[in-house]
Image (cartoon, grey):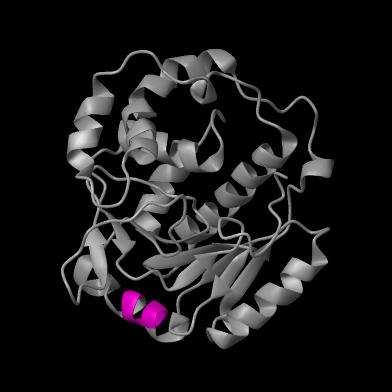
Amino acid sequence: MIPTYLIHYTPLKERLVHMQDVLFKLDLISNTCVIHCFDAPDLSIDLQNSLELWSSRIPSIAPILLANVLCPTGVNYDTVLDYSSKLRDYPSWMSPRPLNNGEISVLLKHFTALSHVAHGTEPFGLILEDDIFLNSSSYSSLYSCLASLSEYNPDYLDLAGGAGLTVPGSPGDVLSPVNPSRTRTNAAYVVSASFAKKICNSFFPLCFPIDWHLQYIMSHNYPASSCFWASNNPLIHGSMHNLVKSWRD
């Protein structure tokens, strides 16, 4: 059974109850560690990101971020990525800004989960945020993905999608390779122990929100990393589908 780490904001007790049901239905509850440290209200006000670092790092991931937004379903991603790489005037939503305590909290919780995977005895770990929902085929689809890990040996595998991002795959594919390596929303992903160690060694200083932060590490530090997305997402990111209110609202 794959070791599982649940990113949870302690005051949202109803989410933990919901996730306990999700984990039970996925037969993961007995092997799950709840990451409840680093809640936003408990963080030091001195913990902050550098706006200068944001400015210096954003060009490394700007083409991917722009392509993610500009590429509708059915349009060749590589074509849009090539177009995006030529742009030099970035939209305002990429402008440097301070991270809020909620974003810093999520970063530190993911770092904690990644550290557990890196120091564990299993080759892979599963990291879930506390707004995951199931579909009618979640159990079978998830275990098909997990059974494929030994064949594909990914560094990173996205399981819940999000942000409207899809990847083309052949009929019958369980996992689809993604090149260049890309994150989506980091709501549910498998990470190898070896890659989790690399991420942890590159995690600080904090710079971007978690999805951009991991994107930067993949793009800049480890561009040859092996990234896959589940062809048929076994899990649903509740916040992205308005099934639960996002903590950002």
Q: What residue do we see at 19% from left, 39% from top?
A: 78
| Horizontal arrangement in the rendering, residue 205 relative to residue 80 (left or right) | right
Q: Compared to 67, does 247 lie above or below?
A: below
Q: Report if residue 235 lies within the magenta region.
A: no
Q: Residue at x 18, y 36 (%)?
A: 79
Task: Give the number of callouts.
Answer: 0
Choose between 166 and 73: the one closer to the eye: 73
The correct choice, above or below, for 12 with respect to 249 in the image is below
| Residue visible at 53% across and 12% down in the picture | 52
142 in the magenta segment = yes
Image: 229 above or below 218: below
Residue at figure coordinates x 30%, y 80% from the top left: 147
Residue 161 in the image: state x and y as whole percent: 43, 59
Q: Position of residue 139 (x, y in %)?
A: 45, 84
Return the residue nearer the eye: 164 or 197: 164
Percent x, y of residue 20: 68, 78
The rendered magenta stretch, by its main secondary structure, is classed as helix
Locate the C terminus by quadrant. Answer: top right
Name the quadrant containing residue 6. bottom right
| Range covered by the magenta-colored residues | 141-145
Side (left or right) of 228 relative to 122: left
Q: Quadrant of the N terminus?
A: bottom left
Is residue 235 among what the camera can see?
yes
Residue 221 appearing in the image: no
Q: Is residue 171 above or below residue 195?
A: below
| Quadrant in which residue 5 is drawn | bottom right
Could you say where residue 26 lies in the image, as x and y percent from the top left? 53, 83
Q: Is residue 205 left or right of residue 195?
A: right
